[in-house]
Image (cartoon, helix red, strand yellow):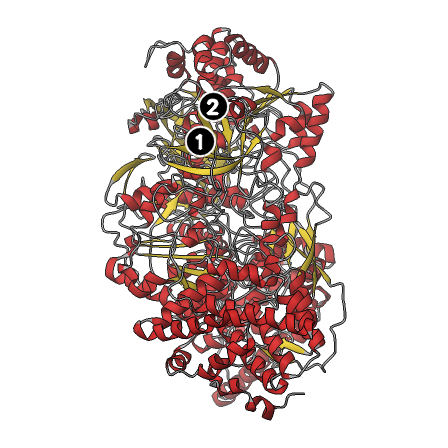
Amino acid sequence: MTTRRDLLKGAAAGVAAGLLGPSLLTKTALAQGTVEPAADGVWKITGSHWGAIRARVDRGKVAEVVPFEDDQNPTDMYKGIHGLIYNPSRIKYPMARVDWLKNRKNSDRTQRGDNRFVRITWDQALDLFYEELERVQTEYGPWALYAGHTGWRQTGQFHSCTNHMNRAVSMHGNYVKKVADYSTGAGQTMLPYTLGSTEVYSQGTSWPLILDNAKVIVFWANDPKKNLQVGWTCETHGSMKYLDELRDKVAAGEIRVISVDPVKTKTANHVGAEHLYLNPQTDVPFMLGIAHTLYNEGLYDKDFIGTYTLGFDDFIQYVQGKADDGIEKTPEWAANICGVDADTIRAFARLMAANRTQLVYGWALQRQQHGEQPYWMAAVLASMLGQIGLPGGGISYSHHYSGVGVPTSGAAMPGAFPLNLDLGMYPEHDSENFNGASRVIPVARWVDCLLNPGEQINHNGNKVTFPDIKMCVFTGCNPFHHHQDHNRMREAFRKLETVVTVDYSWNATCRHSDLVLPACTQFERNDIDGYGAYSNSGVLAMHQLVDPLFQSKTDFEIFTELTHRFGRNKEYTRDMDEGQWLRFLYGECKKANEGKFDMPEFDQFWEEGIVRFPEGKPWVRHADFRKDPELNALGTPSGFIEITSRRIEGYGYDDCGPYPKWFEKAERSHGGPGSDKHPLWLQSCHPDQRLHSQMCESDEYRETYAVQGREPIYMSPEDAAARGIADGDVVRVFNDRGQLLAGARVSDNYPQGVVRIHEGAWYGPVDASIGALDTYGDPNTLTMDVGTSQLAQATSANTCLVEMEKFEGPLPPVTSFGGPTEV
Amino acid sequence: MTNPVKEGADKAVACRWWASVLFSEIDEKQLDLYGKGELGPLLEGLPHLIPEEDADLVEALRQDIESWKKVTSARLILATDYASLFLGHGREGPLPYASYYYSEGRRLFAKPHDDMVERLNKAGLQINAQGQEPADHLAIMVSYLALLYEESHSAAYIATFITEGILSWLPQFTKHCNNVTTEFQFYQLVLQILQAFLQKEAEEIRGA
Amino acid sequence: MITKLKNLALSFWRVMSKPATKISLGVLAFGGFLTGIVFWGGFNTAMEMTNTEQFCIGCHEMRDNVYVELQDTIHYTNRTGVRATCPDCHVPHNWSHKVARKMQASKEVFGWVFGTINTKEKFEAKRLELAQHEWARFAANNSLECRSCHNYDSMDWEKMSPAAKFYMQPASERNVGCIECHKGIAHHLPINDSGVNPILAKVEQGATSQTLEEGKQYFVVKPIAIYEDEDLTKQAGTLSYAAPVKVIEKKDDKVKLQLKGWRKDKGFGRVYHSDFGKNIRVAVMEKDPAQNPDLISVGLSQNDPATGLDWSEVTVEFWAKEGAFIPDVATLWNAAGEIYSSNCSTCHAQPDPAHFDANSWPAQFNGMVGFTSMDPSTQALVLTYLQLHSSDYAEGTH
């Protein structure tokens, strides 16, 4: 045995101890040789956007994840949760972009996205964060800070990172915020004018009533089987069984389901729907052709129109070609644009008029240029059919979202950590001087804002003046996933002096930032959540599975320490720790439910893991309006359904008229503008195996669907054959805005001229240059960054044409994720 | 054959140095020591621990360290190099964990991690509080190796650990690090020398 | 019988009005003085005797109900052993108020005699009424009895839990009466009131004691029924939050009120709004009364170019109960504002009320309100608040 004296004799022993450092290993208190008893571990319960799970934790590691037994239809994605925690893209330490660290606001930003980073301590990181907030508020003002950006964050009501960041930053100073979101920007702005409510986030008619009463169900650009896998809060998947029941009813010939969509969707295939193909982006002409039929064949409900709506006559003048463009919107006219023949259009109109028809619209439809129009037109169509407010009739814009259609229990759900300041709290820098600029901007125009400060745009009847933003703080979101035209975005990012991002994995937004702070995943902290965002089926305990990995922290800790720097951490936390907050939030929920729903004391709840509430009563959307339109007036300016909106007419926008209209798109496939150069329509809908960009970094799960390590691009056999592309090939997809590599998946669910890449694919450009090839396949490398119209100024992602070719030559490795690709 | 005791001591010290270099960035104090040539004794001992044909690696290392003096912000540059190689912020940044190269690859906290945890448990060891890294981090494995030398564990055990625990993946890791553009070559050379040492050790023990 | 009493009274008067002949002034005075002491002492002793917990719980109605409830609370048993007895809270400490209270308490003796709450069921049925009497008494003197022990000026905020300090410090600054928030601190709450927002409850409380004067304008503090007739038997409709009314006539606790509003000339036209073209509800009439020309007078029809609808001004006169009207609507809006802020900022920052105009608010509100747990009544309050503080009414909006 070498003794210490022997060690000293070695030549190498002359090395200074300082160069060796302390040993990384020390003796434990346990006697040498004691092995920890091989336990199988403990089972814990928690929740997520993908559903509730039970996880077995063995010796500090998550060993096994299974769906919560209440969940009758768990999504396959629970298998990706292990990889969400243990993936190589995890942010381990606070990091700073080296050039920014040296030169701060004067750093060279041309290499953003491809810069080198260096590790810093938490203290250094938070000091820098605070210094920058101070600098921006004092050198500039509240107009220069943008910290209100939107995202899906992780689940859990206490640890809602959006709330943590906004409260902390609000305590320091005011800043520019946003309105609307990327999911439903056009719809939520448009529908209040027509139906008096945002509609898109509203509970809908209960599925049992639809199944019992509807004879025809139309899924219009809607894929609930795919989208109901995830939820805003912990998803119960309670609506999945209704899709199965629907499938059975279709098979028995009791209900006809028609899926109006260029693509044969997952839902259509599952329930056995009839596929009604139409050319992409031509839904409005199709619906105008239907309206023409209903009107001219006397099939529309005159009483309903008279009692419940305003403005029908002006609209019909347009349909009849007696006003506006003077073109009669006959089925023949429509067929020319939408590719559905005139007879089919007429038959479809007659079918809907003759039967109890439930219209169910999806959100992808309004994420295109003039996205307000199809939603408006759909409401008019529903009005003409006159079945709004009847069970199994009328229109829904939300049945694919978070379990809408499962009756609400009526129980109160737990509140959250406050997003706002408490009464009587004021920010350190309380200036409200936004220098003549708007303090709220439409979210999808924030890159325009970066590129053109001072510019004025129209938005929803108002004028918005873009502030001159210098600094951004991001948390719970990934702008480099959801915003369009990444190359344009890279240009815009070069204008920012400081970008601070708090996240748990190294996505593209982090790569383009200056300060990157590691938050831990939701599985590394305790929390509570509502079970079922609309069903309110219960309250779920979220047990911490493992300690925060590496040096990550909860957002609560991060922002407590930030506010500590200006002496207000106690105010920020209300002097309560995680445990106290959970008890407080649970207690308030229990109080709110007193006398209606029983809830045990916190400790019992925490041990049992869940409080369940009984299912609520079935309900019909708009029924009370139908019953008494005066007493239960809609939230429109008149209280009635406004087919024509005088208010919108008053705005005088050339891209959003007084009634729903057909506007040609900037680019459109199948004979539309730009289709000669780039003939393929790129559909970038919500993914089937992620929540947006969340879980893309779960390597073990991504490998189940990636094609040669890239995001799949789905295409028709015809388009593949015409280009010599085989299933499994890597293809380069491109247009004038960018280029990417993706893996070909040939499928006859896709018609000629249509390709799909799911959004949320992690952007991995080869270098920092504008126009750099994206190695993984993020569709937003190719999409167009324009507002839907001057009304909503929302995202137009689905107005996008591309071309593709088989990729020849040495394949560049995928650079989106942590770790080298070749292993 | 040279003095086994002396050699064991040298190996232990070398491993302690490797672990320190691989685990965290060089701080101001250490930079100063390097500048004063305090690594000298080890640099003299290293060529004896690695194959002859790799001896020029040590000279290259010495020269690299010398070149630090010519730059004003050497510490920041070295820290940046370190981050690019060991802290994985994407774009092919290599990851210094055995798990990453195990089986289907691209995993963390996989079997190699669990194996290492078991080894440490059996030896009554724990990673000290400053370490927030999993047990299969290269630095921790090399730190364990240092203890094996210090406590004169059986050559067979040492050889098995080197071969199965480290050499099963180190060459891949070193190769990836060689492909990363850095300002200095310090870390790449450190890894190459470590790899050479381990390969020689394994061969000799097997051969002996 | 009457004559006999009359004679008795007369002879008594004759004796008392004659100056004394045999008894000296000193004796009379001193005797009177002693008698006074005895009487006063006896009076006070009797009074003090009735001011003890022993006395109160002598009646089983008190002993078996509220006394049992008290024993579970902090006012009965706590760390320091300082406790309150019945009179500490329920008998005013101020002497004249004490006497007044005692006189009022004779009603309670009646109750005991006639057994109005002598069973559990009867007690529970009356609990709300009993509670409301006490709440009104506390409200009237700003919880003076509580303050004989609890003093805002002596509160050490740093010793409080953060949640407690969060509520108490602002309350102290506004000198809020303790009972406004701490109902149910010593005895069980009546079930109806367990969910009422304390700030809103205070406003409603204020209305119950507001006396209305003819010719003056008031605002209704919560939705109430309105009637065609003075006897309040034929319901004409319902007033909505903050409806502005003028008192035309007053009869006891009933008032005849006038409301001016605007209705849409479509359908029954039975929903009345605060202003032309504004969907801010002030009243909803029943279908028949809405068409009754004796009840409603309708002005000329005007077209609203914003929607194309025709509107008419309406004036309606009706009867209602006093007790739900306040002269200053600001207190109601303060309550509504706090409810809005706390309910609507869970997931995102709530929009400034002036961010939308009055007719845009219903759509925004309808889309989001499902995510809160506000009951329909509270929803109506918050929506009206938002509409009346919308960009149509606020100055300098963005």
Is residue B132 something that shows in the picture?
no
Tell me the SS state at disc 2. Answer: loop
Q: Nearer the viewer, residue A272 or C210?
A: A272
- Number of dots carrying numbers: 2
Q: Residue at point 41% right, 68% down? A: B79
Q: Is residue A799 left or right of residue A234?
A: left
Outermost residue, bottom side:
A5
User: A410 above or below A805?
Assistant: below
Q: Chain of mark 2?
A: A
The quarter of the picture where residue A327 lies is top left
Dot 1 amino acid type: Asn
The quarter of the picture where residue B109 lies is: bottom right
The label shown at residue A753 is: none
Q: Chain of mark 1?
A: A
Q: Gap in Å between the C-alphas at discs 1 and 2?
A: 9 Å
Instruction: State which quarter of the image contains the N terminus of chain C.
Output: bottom right
Image spot of residue C104 (x, y percent): 56, 63
CB atoms of marks 1 and 2 within 8 Å: yes
Left or right: A770 with respect to C75? left
Query: Where does label 2 land, which residue?
Result: A280
> Is tag 1's residue or tag 2's residue first in the polypeptide sequence?
2
Crowd rating for badge 2 (residues with CA inside 10 Å; few <14, some 14–19, many 20+): many
Q: Provide the residue designation for mark 1.
A: A798
The residue shown at (70%, 31%) is: A244
Nearer the observer, C162 or A155:
A155
Q: Amino acid at mark 2?
A: Pro
Measured as percent of width and height from the top left, residue A558 is found at: 46, 65
Residue at x 55% of width, y 81% of height: B13
Q: Quadrant of residue C5?
A: bottom right
Residue C288 vs C258, above or below: the answer is above
Of the 4 image quadrants, the one containing the C terminus of chain C is: top left
Circle 1: element type:
loop
